[in-house]
């Protein structure tokens, strides 16, 4: 597991999400990549990686009506300090790219009243999507998820070399938690982990994550990777499940315009 570096994780992420969140990838003049989403406007889905060419990223993001953003990995980008001090930097979000060993992962026993369903398909079913549409206490935020994110998941398409599994935990027949596993070679990616806001605090996130790790092992993966915000309860949750930090890139969002 320790021999999986940031480049391999990034390559796997680009491949795994090519049929879903990543609409296309453009090569930057300095050999980096610009990942963009046709449907989702957030900077995390429209971002330059392995590049410090802010001018090019600005021009490219402007054509798509997006804010210019860079995912700066200090171990690979060298100019991260300069970008962090750039006068047009609007916000910086530290992230964690984490790895977990799933070779010995076992499917957890479901507590009484809970059942686990797995869909081996590019797009998840409506039960899974109903969880994604109820992750937040704020009805307005859930409405945005319903309008922006759920159509992307519904329209997900198969990608050659990627095996996709969507997991849904239900309580007495009602979907309450979900997670997605994308496997490409020895790596599996963990995405879309969540539980209904009304069921938060019942350990469902940890339960569905353990189930996802077992599903990844069954699919032939040795290591599971994930991305999360640094320093919060989500990172602590995954740390408690055996995941360790492999890279700590920062998502930097800049004001539009010339550098």
Image (tube, rainbow, N blue to C red):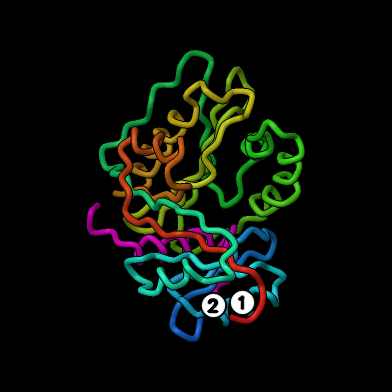
Residue 27: % across, % down: 51, 80
What segment carries the magenta color? 1-26
Label 2's element?
A: helix
Q: Which mark is residue 54?
A: 2
> Which residue is pictured at 41% across the width and 53% down the height?
183
Q: CA distance from mark 1 to mark 2?
A: 6 Å
194 or 237: nearer the eye? Answer: 237
Q: Residue furthest top?
A: 112
> Which residue is pictured at 34% across the width and 62% down the height?
6
> Which residue is pictured at 52% across the width and 71% down the height?
86
The relative height of residue 235 versus residue 77 in the rendered view (above or below) is: above
Residue 132: % across, % down: 64, 39
Q: Which mark is residue 160?
A: none
Contact, mark 1 vs mark 2 (Cβ under 8 Å): yes
The relative height of residue 208 versus residue 188 in the rendered view (above or below) is: above
Quadrant of the rendered structure where residue 7 is? bottom left
Give the residue at mark 1: 58
Q: Is residue 128 visible?
A: yes
Quadrant of the rendered structure where residue 102 is? top left
Q: Is residue 220 visible?
A: no
Answer with left or right where residue 187 lies relative to residue 40. Answer: left
Q: What is the crowding at mark 1: few (fewer than 14 residues within 10 Å), some, or many (at least 20)?
A: many
> Which residue is pictured at 53% across the width and 32% down the height?
117
């Amino acid at each position: 597991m320790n021999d999986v570096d940031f480049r391999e994780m990034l390559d796997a992420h680009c491949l795994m999400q090519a049929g879903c969140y990543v609409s296309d990838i453009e090569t930057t003049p300095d050999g980096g990549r610009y990942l963009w989403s046709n449907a989702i406007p957030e900077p995390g889905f429209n971002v330059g990686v392995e590049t410090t060419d802010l001018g090019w990223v600005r021009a490219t993001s402007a054509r798509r009506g997006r804010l210019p953003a860079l995912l700066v990995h200090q171990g690979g980008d060298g100019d991260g300090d300069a970008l962090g001090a750039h006068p047009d930097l609007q916000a910086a979000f530290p992230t964690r790219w984490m790895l977990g060993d799933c070779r010995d992962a076992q499917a957890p026993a479901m507590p009484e009243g809970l059942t686990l369903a797995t869909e081996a398909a590019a797009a998840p079913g409506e039960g899974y999507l109903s969880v994604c549409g109820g992750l937040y206490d704020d009805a307005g935020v859930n409405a945005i998820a319903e309008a922006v994110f759920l159509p992307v998941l519904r329209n997900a398409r198969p990608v050659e070399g990627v095996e996709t599994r969507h997991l849904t935990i239900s309580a007495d027949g009602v979907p309450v938690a979900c997670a997605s596993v994308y496997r490409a070679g020895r790596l599996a990616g963990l995405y879309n982990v969540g539980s209904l806001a009304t069921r938060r605090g019942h350990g469902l996130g940890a339960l569905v994550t353990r189930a996802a790790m077992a599903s990844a092992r069954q699919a032939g993966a040795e290591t599971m990777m994930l991305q999360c915000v640094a320093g919060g309860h989500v990172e602590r949750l995954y740390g408690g499940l055996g995941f360790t930090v492999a890279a700590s890139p920062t998502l930097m969002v800049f004001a539009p315009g010339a550098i």
